[in-house]
Image (spheres, rainbow, N blue to C red):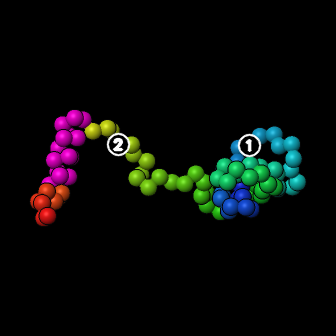
Amino acid sequence: MRGKCPKCGAVFNIKMGLSVLHVGPYRLTKCPACGKRSMMNNFVTDPITWPPEEKDGGETKAPLTDEELKQKRADDSRYEDTSDSA
């Protein structure tokens, strides 16, 4: 089931479960994007927009080793202007 927040417009998956307050396809749900509670339609066909997708493809980078860190600093310092123009 998908819900669409009428306040912020986020579309997200709603967990199936017992709902105390519902009227037809609408039920009281808390939006994970904005945190507001409101009566939301449970049967939305819009594409899911929450949670937002990660831009780096979801891959986590391993921390740099000491040698890699030294090499990176050396490469970065190559572009610094070290001449004194004063």
Disc sitting over residue 81 in the figure: none
Q: Position of residue 12 (x, y in %)?
A: 65, 53
Q: Is residue 79 above or below residue 70?
A: below
Q: Is residue 1 visible?
A: no
Which residues are the magenta region? 65-78
The foreground one among 86 and 71 is 86
Q: Position of residue 70 (x, y in %)?
A: 18, 41
Q: Mark 2 packing: few (<14 Cα in 10 Å), some, or many (20+)?
A: few
Residue plotted at (71% across, 44% down): 15
Name the residue type under label 1. Answer: Met
Name the residue type under label 2. Answer: Lys
Q: Quadrant of the C terminus?
A: bottom left
Q: Position of residue 60 (x, y in %)?
A: 39, 43
Per the model, the C-alpha gap separating discs 2 and 1 is: 35 Å
Check disc 1 and report the residue beneath it: 16
Sequence order check, earlier mark of 2 and 1: 1
Secondary structure beneath disc 2?
Answer: loop
Residue plotted at (66% across, 57% down): 11
Residue lying furthest bottom in this view?
85
Residue plotted at (59% across, 58% down): 49
Q: Quadrant of residue 3?
A: bottom right
Left or right, residue 66 beside residue 25 = left
